[in-house]
Image: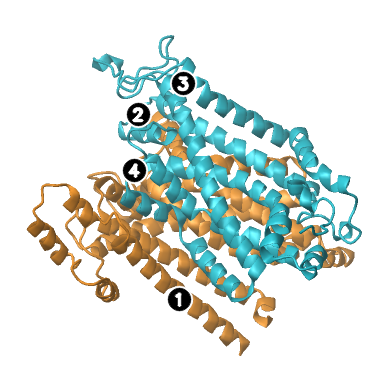
Amino acid sequence: MALPTPPGVAAGIGGTPSAGLPQSAQPGLPPADVYESELRRVWRHLAGSGMGRLGIGLFLLVVLMAVVGPLAFPFNAAAVSSSARGLLLPPSAAHWLGTDELGRDVFRELLAGAHVSLIVGLAATAISMVLGAGIGIVAGYYGRWGDAVLMRITDFFLVLPQLPLVIALAAFFGQSILIIILVIGMTGWPTTARIVRSQVLSLRERQFITRVRSLGASDLRILRVHILPNVMPLIFANTVLVIGGAILAEATLSFLGLGDPVQISWGTMLHFAFESGAVGRGAWWYFVPPGVCIVIVVLAFTLTGHAIDQALNPRLRGSR
Amino acid sequence: MSTLRYLARKVAWLVVTLYGVVTFNFLLFHVLPGNPVRLLARSGHLTPQAVAEIDRVFGLNHPLGLQYLIYLRDLLHGQLGISYTYREPVSQLLGQYLGNTILLLAGATILTIVLGTLAGVVAARRRGGGFDSMTVTASVIGWALPTFWTGLILVFLLGVWLHAFPIFGMQTPNAVYASPLQHAQDVISHLFLPTLTLVVVNIAQFVLVARAAVIEVLAEDFMVTALAKGLAPRRILWRHAVRNALLPIVTNSALLIGMVVAGAIEVETVFSWPGMGLLVYNSVLNRDYPVIEAAFLVFAVVVLLVNFASDLLYQALDPRVRES
């Protein structure tokens, strides 16, 4: 069934009458190429702003560490020092970042743990986004009592303190990367649900939706073809920001001793540095680098997310 | 009249949420797989009789509905179970540790709000200036800093390296104090680094909130009126703008509590501050489930109550909320 759709909207992500666009852009429905340029405009803004460039640069750096690092400098977890003299050694030519409390090379350990942050951050966020966007779209589009019930549930999870909840869940279900991903993902969706819902609420009342509906389009089609593409950019910007929080949550859980025991991550490194008294002994090469790496990877996503946010929301651009 | 109705609605929502938290807690710890008693029984060396005995002692042989009612009854009597490691009632443990956490969090939260608001106002007044752009940068970095790692760095710099502040516990071990004042001094010096960590990590977010709130008010028409009346700029800023900007600042203070609660767990772990957070950390290491369960309940209830209080405060501060 070929339904007439407003120009650009069917073209996918490109069709974006985004939240912050001035209302005057709406009634006359500008030609398709104005909409088409939206995605390119976001990219241009991203590449043109210092924040966006720094964010993408840091992200590439971490990906390089995670992918190439372990190949170039493989880490052997079993290579513990045979004598006490090899433990917590300061940086040297043999060990660029010294050794840990078992006499293993900290630099190689750091590279071996890089992919955990990225995988947990991305996978947990994917779960949060599917849950949050799904609940937000259903609540915002169908409205009435379904909306009321879903939003009460969302509010309920919004006020639950995330870290104690995540700790309780992780302590309960055991320590593995998969559990950590699930636990962080299942607790991170309420904010997204709220943001998406409010956007869908305003979209639902727009003229082009009313028009398509009066032509007899089904709810499912309206959601899939008209609503979803229009909330995608918002979901995307939110996603990038949520990843940073998920990475911090993984690091915190691992630091508290709830990390995967067989999988090195920056959080578990800090856990063992703390437990072995590296801080008191002044072994800065053991506990400073993992923290710096966490800050870098979180900054990468936060900066990129803010830059995308600014590109999508012209009002933010003015305020800087 | 409408005030009363507003209050009734808020109290009703509070009661419903509290009940929700309690039920959620029950489901989480008693129904989902991974029940600690089952973990115990799964270790393999237990006879079926022993498993049945464990089930009986923990009341797991009852139907689920009855277990739920027993759970609610125990909760109302303040019975939260017995800690596996301390062999003490959990409620007693919480009583010992909660006060220390409140002492730490109250100081850190008040400092964060007061300093954050002041810095936000200054940044908003000189918008685009050096201080303003510095606060924006600092907030991005502050958000990326893991609280526990910031604590470790401060321990290293100010404690281990400079020996400026104590880094462990709440008071000097085995100290004999000449006066209560000296005791207070000792506790305050132990409070310094944990408080500093919490303020450093949380303040930047707060500065941004205060800054945005003041900027929004400064753009309103009545600011122009105040200026046209010939009021002193200082008076306009502090008496007219800041006063109106306090509303969003109050709501965000409530949001801050979630961050502060999370921060307490991390900071108390790093500094061995004998509070709820350290209790949680030790319980996690020892898999002391009754304590983890009760601590989660306490944290959730505290956050709920703070949100409730901020709703009431918001209503008291803003007549417009009362009207609608």
Q: Is residue B238 above or below residue B7?
A: above
Residue for badge 4: A175
Within 10 Å of disc 4 (Cα), the crowding (few <14, some 14-19, many 20+) is some
Q: Is mark 4 on a helix, strand or loop?
A: loop
Mark 3 vs mark 1: in front: 3
Question: Which chain's colour is orange?
Answer: B
Where does the image place residue B34, in percent across and percent down from the top left? 29, 54
Of A163 and A84, which appears nearest the observer?
Answer: A163
Name the disc covering residue A278, or none.
2
Q: Is residue A5 above or below residue A293?
A: below
Mark 2 vs mark 1: in front: 1
Compare marks 4 and 3 and give the one earlier in the sequence: 3
Q: In this view, does A155 lie above or below A171?
A: below
Q: In the image, what residue type sits under mark 2? A: Ala
Residue for badge 1: B16
Residue for badge 3: A70
Q: What element carries label 1?
A: helix
In contact (CB < 8 Å): disc 2 and disc 1: no
Compare marks 2 and 3 and give the one earlier in the sequence: 3
Residues flagged by tags 2 and 3 on a common chain: yes
Q: In the image, what residue type sits under mark 3? A: Pro
| Quadrant into which the C terminus of chain B falls | bottom right
Mark 2 vs mark 3: in front: 3
